[in-house]
Amino acid sequence: MSKDDNNTFEISRRKTLAALGTIGAASAGAGLGTSAWFNDTETFDNNIVTAGTLDLIVNYYSWWDQGMAGSGSVSGTADGEAVTAELSDVKPGDNGRIVLSPRIETNPAYLWLCGELTANDENGLTEPEALVDDTGGDPGEWQGELAQSIDVTVGYCDIQMDGGDLGPNDVSTEQEIWTGSLADFLMAIEAGVPLDGGSGVPEEGSFFEPGDQSCFAGTEDEGDTPSLCLEWEVPGEEVGNEIQGDSLEFDLQMYAEQCRHNDGTTNPCAPARTVSTGDGFSDISFEKALNMQALARGGSGRGEIQVHGDSGGVEDTNVYGSDTYPSNTDIPFTAEIDPTAQTASLTVNEVTVTDDDVTDGDANGDSTGDPEWPSGVPDYIDVSINASSASGNDVTTVVEDVVINGSPVSTSISENDGKEYLAVTNVDASSTATVEGTIRFEGSQSDYTTEDWVGIDFR
């Protein structure tokens, strides 16, 4: 090979190259008089490695039937830009179908679906609506009943066209995934769900757990990929005047991530978690839905734990009998929010206090008047841990070794003259949300006041 010869290496789906080894030639010379090492050089110049590509394109089709008002359809392709559709004058008996047909350019990919109900408004009350609906309001944000009144069936579907425009008869459902109201469906996918490239569903139905789904084939693969169909209907026999004038808006997104070197467990829909600290209280505390406290207590007070919630009052108990918290001692704590049981609990030193219903909508204690989660625990919540210490009493309140849902938070907080917070946003609460750590009150127990405490606020 001459020095001018170049090798070009391209990485594609069907061709993966091993690392280049070193090629050389070595020889030795021996003799009387002057000698030198024989040598030769082989050069590999201008080698090229080309990255593969992955591009998600979604063809969409929407068809609707509004009886005497007629039927219609809209179709197109989404490739990077958001697509907006609007349907007005919806009445009981109306129905339709939305088809999302993903195409993965080149490489295979895992596909995720997420969405969100962004508006569900009342828009005032007509006279007949007022007889059955007293929520009122104009625009009456989030007081409408339309999202709860639309039934949806979601499934993997197949498209067979013989030419011409796509019509409702060209689509057949292969596998049903989910049924319920539109509001419930959007809540179910808000945190993101994996779609299955083989049109499969788990035995219990619904969507696979992350990592159990199969990839969607790329355009360089053989075989077809399923489309996703959402069939909707406003049931005429069940829905009446309560939806008059109501309106809703919602978003749907699809995300693709490469299959190669990927186990399918990474959720691209999940919001990024942030961690921050500061003096005083964070916005989370001012907008909290639930509050927990561990109070060192001074004077004749006893060390307590509290959960502000249940029936508008305070659930509390003593941790150390008639004593205050011990000083200069690391004390473990665990706070849990269970969205299935709809409960909240705080455990300190193996003593637990529980709010048995975080959806009753009552105030979190008479002093705050903050609402809980009347619509259920959201999939993602914000947490603020607060350390408080009275000014000038030589007591320092410390919170450290914080772990949230098994993931350590490297930041600790310590306060001896006021309040300091550690705020963590977008904590996954789709299953039990757990906050763990240690509390320490540094100083003398005789110096404790009612201002020495640790609080945990949830929003």
Image (cartoon, rainbow, N blue to C red):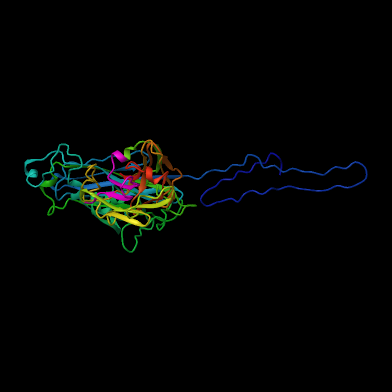
Q: Is residue 180 left or right of residue 59?
A: left
User: Is residue 270 in sight in this rendering?
Assistant: yes
Quadrant of res 178 = bottom left
Q: Is residue 265 above or below residue 84?
A: below
Q: Position of residue 377 (x, y in %)?
A: 28, 50
- Residue drawn where x is 14% and y is 44% of the image: 69
Residue 299 included in the magenta stretch of the image: yes
Find residue 63 and report its horizontal and vertical position in percent. Answer: 24, 47
Residue 336 is left or right of residue 376, and the answer is: right
Looking at the image, the residue that sits furthest to the right is 32
Q: Which residues are magenta?
A: 285-310
Look at the image and tell me in which quarter the C terminus lies. top left
Quarter of the image with the N terminus is top right
Residue farthest to the bottom? 203
Which residue is more in the foreground, 334 or 71?
Answer: 334
Corner quadrant of residue 281: top left
